[in-house]
Amino acid sequence: METDHRPWGYYEVLSDESDHKVKRITVYPGKRLSLQRHKRRAEHWYIIRGEGVATLNGEELRLTTGQPLDILCGALHRIMNPGTENLTFIEVQTGEYFGEDDIERYEDDYGRI
């Protein structure tokens, strides 16, 4: 299993096929991912531990264990962990391309714009 560590936490690739990619993503307390969009894929998030606040096209949504979120291709999105424990969710990507270079960042706490 491939694990990639980032400033906000880490992710593990659970499946990487021509028609989908599945990641288990862990966000550390107080951290958030960049505000971003993808041109070539949609994402489905399913929270499996902790709570998060997702931003989807400017709307903030509180997510807890067992809740899903669908992110359409081109939607501006991010997730943050406001809690004191790790936030973990499963991300299922569908579309035509799943490379990390399909991330357009608009805001980033870690200087990656």
Image: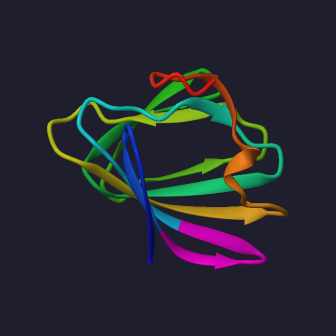
Coordinates of residue 66 in the picture (x, y in percent):
35, 59
Choose between 73 and 31: the one closer to the eye: 31
Quadrant, the N terminus:
bottom left
Choose between 111 and 97: the one closer to the eye: 111
Choose between 84 and 71: the one closer to the eye: 84
Position of residue 22 in the picture relative to residue 10 (left or right): right
Choose between 72 and 10: the one closer to the eye: 10
Tell me where residue 29 sits by quadrant. top left
Main secondary structure type of the part rendered in magenta: strand
How many discs mark residues in the rendered view? Answer: 0
Any part of residue 31 in sight: yes
Instruction: State yes or no: residue 82 in magenta.
Output: no
Any part of residue 72 in sight: no
Q: Residue at x 60, y 21 (%)?
A: 58
Position of residue 53 in the picture relative to residue 42 (left or right): left
The span picked out in magenta is 13-22
Q: Residue at x 57, y 28 (%)?
A: 112
Instruction: State yes or no: residue 21 in magenta.
Output: yes
Coordinates of residue 2 in the picture (x, y in percent):
47, 71
Tell me where residue 43 sits by quadrant. bottom right
- Asked if 62 appears above or below 94 in the picture, the reply is above
- Asked if 70 appears above or below 77 in the picture, the reply is below
